[in-house]
Amino acid sequence: MFGLDPLSRSVAVAEILLLLTAAAFIGWLLGRLTRSGRVKALRMAISRREAELAISPSTDTISVSANPSHSETETPAEPLLPPVPMIPVDPLAPIYGAPTLLIPADDTETEQPELPLTPTPVEIPPLGAPVPEAPPAFPPQPAPATATGETAVLNRIAARASELQFDRIGRALPTDADDLKDIIGVGPFLERKLHSLGIYTFRQISHFSKEDSKQVNEIIEFFPGRIDRDDWVGQAKVLHERKYGV
């Protein structure tokens, strides 16, 4: 470097010192530039703030004494709006010592009725006085009975009794009824269905034709074709002959 011997100790020390000096100068220069930039930015911000304060109106004026030992005093400006009168929400609050909540008064509102300051006294009968009888409690009236469940089914079946050919099947009275449950496939509920249709005897069932069996099967809401599969007609003939001998 500059014709110096790089292998000499003194030359190496001198080069190191020069490099350190150059680095220090460069760092000082960068720091100064950075600080000057910050100062400039702060001055611009202060200028903008002063301009904003000069434009916006101030409601308060601050006077500072010429003597620096005196503290700053604030002189409040005149209020822009007149004070709004306040009224208590609860008129009984001052009496019972409760905290009063104030709301702005409004002349346009209608006057509210004044609440009594003292509660209405309740008359207590003296000891031993007859206690007035309570009004009689009427028991709840039962709801009108409606046809539901089995009754509704039987009524629905009875309404279609006129569709059968009783001139061919034959007619019977409840007093002539046979025990239709002896027929295999007929249970208690199914027997009541047949009774509601006007069929009470083995003789009537033994007179069923294919069309009658199909029609009765549909009216009593039984499984389709079940009367024919269980052979009600054949069973009814055997039971009728066994009971009456004819």
Image (spheres, grey):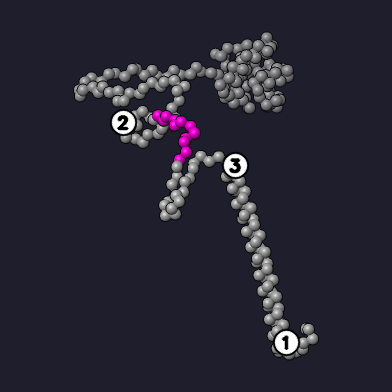
Query: What secondary structure is marked by label 2?
Result: helix
The verdict on residue 77 being magenta is yes
Task: Kindly identify which residue carries mark 2.
Answer: 95
Residue projecting furthest to the bottom: 8
The quarter in which the C terminus is drawn is top right
Tell me if mark 3 has few (under 14), some (14-19) or many (20+) residues whose alpha carbon lies within 10 angstroms of its own: few
Q: CA distance from mark 3 to mark 1?
A: 66 Å
Percent position of residue 36, x then y: 65, 61
In the rendered structure, which amino acid carries the disc numbered 2? Ile
Tell me if mark 2 has few (under 14), some (14-19) or many (20+) residues whose alpha carbon lies within 10 angstroms of its own: few
Residues 145 and 57: in front is 57
Report whether residue 179 is seen.
no
Task: Kindly identify which residue carries mark 1.
Answer: 11
The magenta span reads 76-87
Instruction: Give the residue at x 48% y 45%.
Output: 62
Query: What secondary structure is marked by label 1?
Result: helix
Q: Quadrant of residue 194?
A: top right
Rendered view: 99 above or below 63: above
- Of badges 3 and 1, the one in the foreground is 3
Instruction: Give the residue at x 48% y 18%.
Output: 143
Rendered view: 102 above or below 240: below
Of the image marks 2 and 1, the number of the one nearer the N terminus: 1
Query: What secondary structure is marked by label 3?
Result: helix
Residues 54 and 117: in front is 54
Residue projecting furthest to the right: 3
